[in-house]
Image (spheres, rainbow, N blue to C red):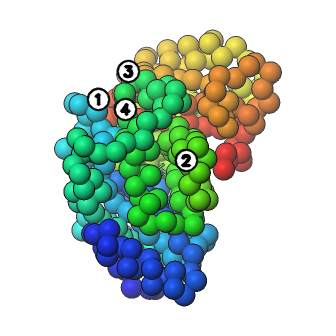
Amino acid sequence: MSQLVIESTVAGLRRTVDEWRASNQTVALVPTMGNLHRGHLSLARLAFDLADRVVLSIFVNPTQFGAGEDYTAYPRTLDKDTSAARVAGTIDALFVPEVDEIYPFGVEQAVQVKMPSIGRELCGAARPGHFDGVATVVARFLNIVVPDTVVFGLKDYQQLIIIKRMVEDLQIGVRIAAGPIEREPDGLAMSSRNRYLTDRERAIAPELHRTLRLTTDALRDGERDFALLSDSARTRLDEAGFKVDYVEIREARSLGKPNGRDAPEDLIVLGAAWLGKARLIDNLNVSPDSIPV
Ligand code: AMP
């Protein structure tokens, strides 16, 4: 197992990466907000398989949280994360900058990336500015680390499509890799926000995955009345106790609206719903093997 380097400054991280580059080693970056779980560690494993060196960043990015969202409450567990990263054995460097390091002119005066309409749909409709904040911080991390590969989870599917779009449009020279959603045994997608659930809510939470599964089953069976499918998914979730933001069927590659003649493998079902204090998101490709990158 290699020694885990912990860097909190841009200069320090750049020095570490420069040393690797001097011996022609490739680098993969896994951006996270910490509170590491099996989902994050599976991405580190994928990064380990794709590059000689792995940087995992932990940064709770203020610009992607809206007013009244959980920026302050978001779990910060650096000691546990450091142990988990050490035990995993797939991570060479943890990059754990403070806010000033990433936004040297301050958050208010930061140069920002503004996403086109894709950033204002689905989760972007309920969270105005969220994906601009995500794109802004990922652009910064890509400039700091200059990795060969950056790894994201399919859990945040819209985020992945948005980063793909930003990388193409800004012509950033990085390969994007995506890892599958890691789930609890009952199907609930792993997430740092699951800890906001009470025991009662936690028992209900897998219903989101179950409902998306029923929807993908129907699509696989040939149903193409998308409005009907999302209405019945919504009703099911309402009845289980969720407050639904959306359940939508989209074209998997672009997240555009499907045309009704789509092959099953071109379709994805995405959902977001509140359960108490937790806003849960999940998605399922109709064809389980299709990964968009
Ligand atoms: P976060 O720390 O929640 O911002 O997530 C950091 C990265 O981990 C993102 O690319 C997420 O999509 C990914 N991720 C989060 N949860 C999971 C999961 N359950 N399975 C796979 N990847 C995940």
Looking at the image, tell me whether mark 3 or mark 4 is earlier in sequence order.
Answer: 4
Q: Position of residue 27 (x, y in %)?
A: 53, 72
Residue 129 image label: 4
Looking at the image, tell me whether mark 2 or mark 1 is earlier in sequence order.
Answer: 2
What residue do we see at 44% from left, 29% from top? 124
Q: Which residue is mark 3?
A: 243
For the residues carrying marks 3 and 2, which lies nearer the camera in this image? 2
Q: Amino acid at mark 1?
A: Gly
The part of the image, by quadrant, that contains residue 221 is: top right
Picture layout, residue 248 above or below residue 10: above
Within-10-Å neighbours for mark 2: few <14, some 14–19, many 20+: few
Q: Is residue 87 visible to us here?
A: no
The answer for how far apart the CA atoms under marks 3 and 4 are is 21 Å
The part of the image, by quadrant, that contains residue 266 is: top right
Looking at the image, tell me whether mark 3 or mark 2 is earlier in sequence order.
Answer: 2
Q: Which residue is mark 2?
A: 170
The answer for how far apart the CA atoms under marks 3 and 1 are is 9 Å
Q: Position of residue 100 (x, y in %)?
A: 22, 57
Q: Amino acid at mark 2?
A: Leu
What residue do we see at 76% from left, 32% from top? 264
Within-10-Å neighbours for mark 3: few <14, some 14–19, many 20+: some
What residue do we see at 32% from left, 35% from top? 278
- Describe the element under mark 2 as helix, strand or loop: loop
For the residues carrying marks 2 and 4, which lies nearer the camera in this image? 2
